[in-house]
Image: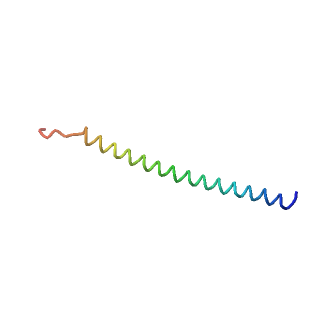
Amino acid sequence: MHTDTIAIIVSILGVGLALWRSIAAMEGRVNSRIDAMSNNLNTRIDNLYQALFIHKDPAA
C-alpha cells in the first residue's frame, strides 16, 4: 500500500470514530433530558391527582 492510501484510511477511521463518540454522547444527553422531563411530568400528574381526588371531609 502507498503511504497516501494508509493516511486516507486512517483519517477515515478517525473521523468515523469521532462521529460515533459524538453521537453516543449526544444520545446520552438527550436520554437524560427526556428522563428528567418524564419525572417532572409524573410529579405534576401525581400532584394534580392528589389535589383533585384526595379530599378530607371537613365535616368528619
- In front here: 11 or 37? 11
- In the image, taking residue 59 as reference, residue 20 lies left or right, namely right
Q: What is the x, y in percent for residue 18?
A: 66, 57
Q: Residue at x 58, y 55 (%)?
A: 25
55 sits left or right of 6 in the view: left
User: To which quarter of the image does residue 45 belong?
Assistant: top left
Q: Out of 25 and 9, give the one closest to the viewer.
A: 9
Q: What colouring style does the render use? A: rainbow
The extreme right residue here reads 1
Q: Give the percent coordinates (x, y) of residue 56.
A: 19, 40
- Position of residue 48 relative to residue 9, above or below, is above
Q: Name the image quarter holding the C terminus.
A: top left
At 73% from the left edge and 55% from the top edge, which residue is drawn? 13
Q: Is residue 49 left or right of residue 25?
A: left
Q: Give the residue at x 75% y 59%.
A: 11
Residue 39 in percent (x, y) is at 41, 47
Q: Position of residue 29 (x, y in %)?
A: 52, 54
Depth check, front residue: 30 or 56: 30
Residue farthest left in this picture:
59
The N terminus, quarter of image: bottom right
